[in-house]
Image (spheres, grey):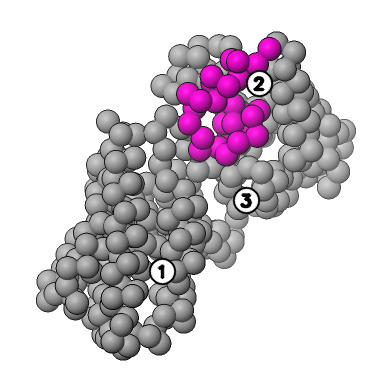
Amino acid sequence: MVLILALVCLGGPATLVHAHTLPFTETTIVLYPDGTFQADLICDLDALALGVPQDSDEAALVAALRALSTDELEDRLDRMQQLFQRRVRVRFDGAPAPFDVSFPERGTAAATNATIPTVLGLTARLAGTVPTGASELEFFASRAFADVHLTILDENRDHAVTTVLERGARSDPYPLTGPVEPPTSLSTGQRYLALGFTHIIPRGPDHILFVIGLFLLGSRIRPLVWQVTAFTVAHAMTLSFAAFDLVTLPSRIVEPLIALSIVYVAVENVLTSRPTPWRPAVVFGFGLLHGLGFAGALRQVGLPEAEKLLGVLSFNVGIELGQLLVIALALVSVGWLRHRPWYRARLTVPLSVAIAGAGIVWVFERTLANP
């Protein structure tokens, strides 16, 4: 339990000021009538060129790249081109197709005059030729890249298809001839369930800390069940309403408030030894906020127009499974100690202080990042 909490606080993704936080590698593959293809991948090229994490401070990256000599910068670009050629695959009938790599935004206004300026921009362009007679296309990006939000634009048939790939996963084959079969309901449900689950574990450290904060207070399971139920119902409501555009709230407001909810729960854990009668109602209110945060993540992924309801329901189920796993891990780790007389002094209070500290950091980061 302590190890899990430490990893979440120290290693969880937080919103960083002046950094490109790109939850997905937006990838668009265009198939042209002349038999060529072009794939544009959106990622933090400055960070890739320097071999540092994608959420690094962009001002520091720009300064580091500008400090390089012309030869050193060209060497970095050569290595980046090799990285894309090694770690990205555009396959036709199972065989990788060769492609050239370029960075079209380098030195343009799109890079230098952006809200967060860069040296190389955010677009890596792969260009190649579709083999004659090819019948299907597959795409793959290694785990060096974030989850892929993939769009295939087939200009030959005026058709477009969009899907989301987990990190390191290969896309389903896209047929280049014959009818294009839409994804089945089963595959759609599975995809959005997995996205909901991974939004909690491992990519939702703030939501994980909130659930652990609920778990830590008190020794009885029944109050915990009431709190988790209130939280679940509330965030399922706002997530569903927001997904269908019935309610909206800017992320610059939602994200700091989510962090504040973590601080509140943790501080209350320190100030009281048992859940207050009004805590489920407070947790319900916080659940409404977390649901809007989940909706923001779902909006980035996009929903299938034909099966929007299925996507929302599956995403909700994935979130619940993630939360249940967090509670299960907490029960296995320290649940059997909840009736010990020293449980509060040695576990609840120090862990709640750590959670409050992480929440306060997120409040400031998210407020400064979204003025």
Cα–Cα gap, marks 1 and 3:
21 Å
Residue on which disc 1 sits = 323
Secondary element at tag 1: helix
Q: Residue at x 47, y 38 (%)?
A: 21
Q: Confirm or deny contact between disc 3 and disc 2 (CB under 8 A).
A: no
Give amino acid for label 3: Arg
Q: Is residue 361 above or below residue 274?
A: above
| Quadrant housing the N terminus | bottom left
Q: To which residue does mark 3 refer?
A: 167
- What is the three-letter code of the residue carrying label 2? Phe
- Sequence order check, earlier mark of 1 and 3: 3
The answer to whether one can see residue 288 in this image is no
- Front residue (pair 333, 79): 333
Q: Residue at x 26, y 63 (%)?
A: 266
Mark 3: give few (<14), some (14-19) or many (20+) Cα within 10 Å.
some
Q: Quadrant of residue 148?
A: top right
Report the Cα–Cα distance between label 3 and label 2.
Answer: 22 Å
Q: Position of residue 305 (x, y in %)?
A: 45, 48
Type of the residue with mark 1: Gln
Span highlighted in magenta in the image = 41-69
Residue highlighted by disc 2: 103
Mark toward the start of the polypeptide (3 vs 2):
2
Residue at point 83%, 40% (across, down): 96
